[in-house]
């Protein structure tokens, strides 16, 4: 499974991307939107379908390399849309067309080492 993460300048752009995701049949349980109001633990739990995803991701090295950077971006006012998908090319294009200024793809599954693309 891959995850595509797009960063947007504001919530309006992120909401536009959600509408575009719905238009290509992405269900609500396949994406999350995170801004400075949302807890990191909550969005990780929802996206990765596990109770303690940060610890699991950290054990695989993803937390140190990616999560701190994402938190910095979000704290600076950017909004993140993360999508779990089997078609990362389509989702990357949808997020880009909706105005994402930075798109990263993460290929990761429990028990596997993560691979980060983009940036």
Image (spheres, rainbow, N blue to C red):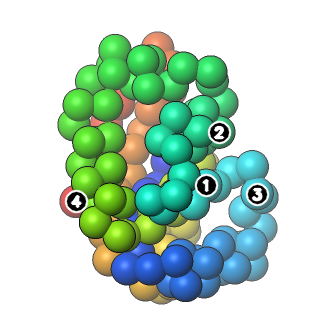
Q: First in sequence, mark 4 or 1: give its number.
A: 1
Query: Mark 2 and 4 residues: CB-CB less than 8 Å, in contact?
Result: no
Label 4 secondary element:
loop
Between the residue at mark 4 and the residue at mark 1, the CA separation in whole angstroms equals 19 Å
Q: In the picture, which quadrant includes the C terminus? A: bottom left
The residue shown at (76%, 57%) is: 28
* x, y percent for residue 10: 44, 80
Q: Are marks 2 and 1 in contact (CB under 8 Å)?
A: yes
Query: Residue at coordinates 48% horizontally, 62% vertically from top-left?
Result: 35
Q: Residue at x 32, y 50 (%)?
A: 71
Q: Where is mark 2, residue-wise?
A: 46
Badge 4 vs badge 1, beta-carbon distance below 8 Å: no
Q: Which residue is mark 4?
A: 119
Location of mark 1 (residue)? 32
Mark 4 against mark 1, which lies toward the viewer? Answer: 1
> Gap between marks 2 and 3, in whole Å?
11 Å
Q: Which residue is mark 3?
A: 28
**How far from the left and from the top, in percent, is residue 113?**
34, 23
Viewer-side residue, 33 vs 96: 33
């Amino acid at each position: 499974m891959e995850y595509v993460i797009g960063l947007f300048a504001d919530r309006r752009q992120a909401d536009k991307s959600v509408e575009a995701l719905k238009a290509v049949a992405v269900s609500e349980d396949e994406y999350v939107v995170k801004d400075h109001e949302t807890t990191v633990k909550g969005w990780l739990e929802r996206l990765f379908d596990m109770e303690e995803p940060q610890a699991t991701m950290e054990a695989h090295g993803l937390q140190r390399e990616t999560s701190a950077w994402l938190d910095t971006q979000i704290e600076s006012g950017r909004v993140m849309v993360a999508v779990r998908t089997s078609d990362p090319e389509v989702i990357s294009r949808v997020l880009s067309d909706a105005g994402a200024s930075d798109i990263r793809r993460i290929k990761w599954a429990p028990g596997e080492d993560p691979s980060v693309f983009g940036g």
